[in-house]
Amino acid sequence: MSGFIDQLAILNPFWLLVVYLGSCTALGLWFTKRVDNDDARADLSDSGNKLLGASATGLFVLIGFTVAILWNVLQDELGAINNEIEVSGKISATSFLLEEEATNRIWADLIDYLDVVSTGDVLHLATGDAPELPSTTTLVALLEEVNNPRNYTTENQWIQQTLVNDVALLSGNRASIRSIATRVMPPVLAAVLVIASGVVAVFAGSSMANHRKPYLVVGWVLSLTLALSLAFWLNNPFTGPIRANFAGVADFADHLRDPPDRPTPPKSTN
């Protein structure tokens, strides 16, 4: 039961928008119903119905434009996470060419880095506190281990530069993740969407005054609530029901904890 409640809580700000737009709709209906003159009330309701069509069209276009932009931001974030896993895979595969002890040391630091990315970094990104991510310390430790001369022999020193370049790619990818996390909806645009949707809901309530069973109008208000909620869900790709998932990073760290066996060199037939 608690899990179901947690899932419902994730749907914020859907519930807040339901209350807000429902109140605006009720306000429009109440104001129109208070008009004593039947003809004046009918004219007011008819005007609300006409204004509803025009204003709703413009509002949905604006919401659709906002959702399209924020959806692209989410896709960029997912791409950055995939790059994180891909580069980490290259580091693990390249370091596998070293002696077993050297490989284990590099993998240990790589696992620490991936663990912090999939836990600590996510919490900071979800709250918008992304100037300095917790994984910075573990990334520095990984770079120091990659640069440690004890991990290389004269025959495999070329591997060091490859690993250094890959760690640099990780650093650049983290910068991309921080940059993407700041691509949020401007406060002015958020305010315009909220205010405009409230005004349109008032028009919807006014248009309901001459309908005995305004089910279609109620359904329209719910559709507006869902569309507006979608825009706010996408506004932060690290929280809510639609978000970038770092589970793949955690899964790859678990894979490194249980590494494959090293191939046994073939025995000489001579």
Image (cartoon, helix red, strand yellow):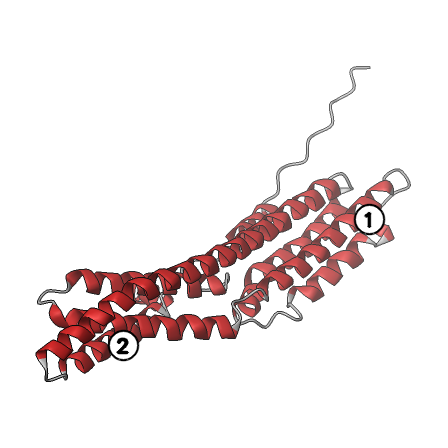
Crowd around label 1: few <14 · some 14–19 · many ≥20 (10 Å): many
Q: Considering depth in this image, is 146 or 45 the residue closer to the camera?
A: 45
Q: Considering depth in this image, is 30 or 113 the residue closer to the camera?
A: 30
Crowd around label 2: few <14 · some 14–19 · many ≥20 (10 Å): many
Query: Would you place residue 230 above or below residue 248 in this image?
Result: below
Circle number at residue 88 = none
- The residue depicted at 38 percent of the width and 65 percent of the height is 228
Name which of mark 1 and mark 2 comes first in the sequence: 2
**248 relative position to 2: left or right:** right
Determine whether the residue tagged by mark 1 lies in a helix, strand or loop. Answer: helix
Mark-to-mark CA distance, 1 and 2: 67 Å
Q: Considering depth in this image, is 211 or 265 the residue closer to the camera?
A: 211
Q: Position of residue 173 (x, y in %)?
A: 67, 55
Q: From the image, which quarter does the N terminus lie in?
A: bottom left
Residue topped by disc 1: 151
Tally of numbered tags = 2
- The residue depicted at 39 percent of the width and 62 percent of the height is 58
- Disc 1 versus disc 2: nearer the observer: 2
**93 relative position to 249: left or right:** right
Query: Would you place residue 87 above or below residue 177 in this image?
Result: above
Q: Is residue 1 visible?
A: no
Residue topped by disc 2: 24
Q: Considering depth in this image, is 38 or 252 the residue closer to the camera?
A: 38
Q: Is residue 178 visible?
A: yes
**138 relative position to 268: left or right:** left
Look at label 2 and name its amino acid: Cys
Q: Position of residue 179 (x, y in %)?
A: 64, 63
Determine whether the residue tagged by mark 2 lies in a helix, strand or loop. Answer: helix
Residue at the top extreme of this rendering: 270
Please say if the residues under marks 1 and 2 sit with CB atoms less than 8 Å apart.
no
Look at label 1 and name its amino acid: Asn
Q: Position of residue 168 (x, y in %)?
A: 76, 54
